[in-house]
Image (tube, rainbow, N blue to C red):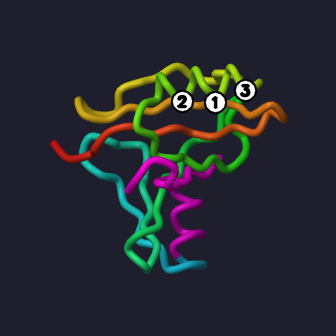
Amino acid sequence: MAHGDITHIDIPVSDLGDATAFYSGLFGWQIAEVPGFEGYPMWQAPNGISGGGLALREEGFTNTRSYVEVDSIDDTVAKATKAGGSLVREKQEITPTSWWAVIADPDGNQIGLFEGSMQG
């Protein structure tokens, strides 16, 4: 993937089991918890490219959120805030080689940012 590609889509849900059954039955998604990410079942679309996760709904996370790959979260956050956006969630480590953060555009739409590689 490259800077600007959508890499992941999180869907907020109230019940992980019910949501897993719903989406796998509806779309044929393969949904499973990955070691190290227990309590966060990840889905893979039949095309083998599209995917994301089912995350428990919480305050501030009530709508589906797309994640965009960026070369640098820090640079992207600075550019977004300069352009009228805001930082919603600080940069956090996923693995030793990957990080995520969330920004909002000037209209308040949340966009997730992903930097790094899940390998390694």
Q: Are marks 1 and 3 in contact (CB under 8 Å)?
A: no
Which residue type carries mark 1? Ile
Tell me the CA gap for discs 1 and 3.
12 Å
Q: Are marks 2 and 1 in contact (CB under 8 Å)?
A: yes
- In primary-sequence order, the first of circles 2 and 1 is 2
Highlighted magenta segment, given as a residue range? 1-24
Percent coordinates x, y for residue 2 in the rendering? 40, 53
Q: Which residue is labeled 3 in the image? A: 83
Q: Which residue is labeled 1 in the image? A: 103
In the rendered view, tell whether residue 37 sits above or below residue 85.
below
Which residue type carries mark 2? Thr
Secondary structure beneath dot 3 equals: loop
Which residue type carries mark 3? Ala
Residue 48 is left or right of residue 80, and the answer is left
- In primary-sequence order, the first of circles 1 and 3 is 3
Q: Are marks 2 and 3 in contact (CB under 8 Å)?
A: no
Quadrant of the snapshot with the C terminus: top left
Secondary structure beneath dot 1 equals: strand
Any mark on residue 76, and which?
2
Percent coordinates x, y for residue 113 in the rendering? 51, 38
In reply to whether residue 12 is colored magenta, the answer given is: yes
Percent coordinates x, y for residue 77 in the rendering? 57, 25
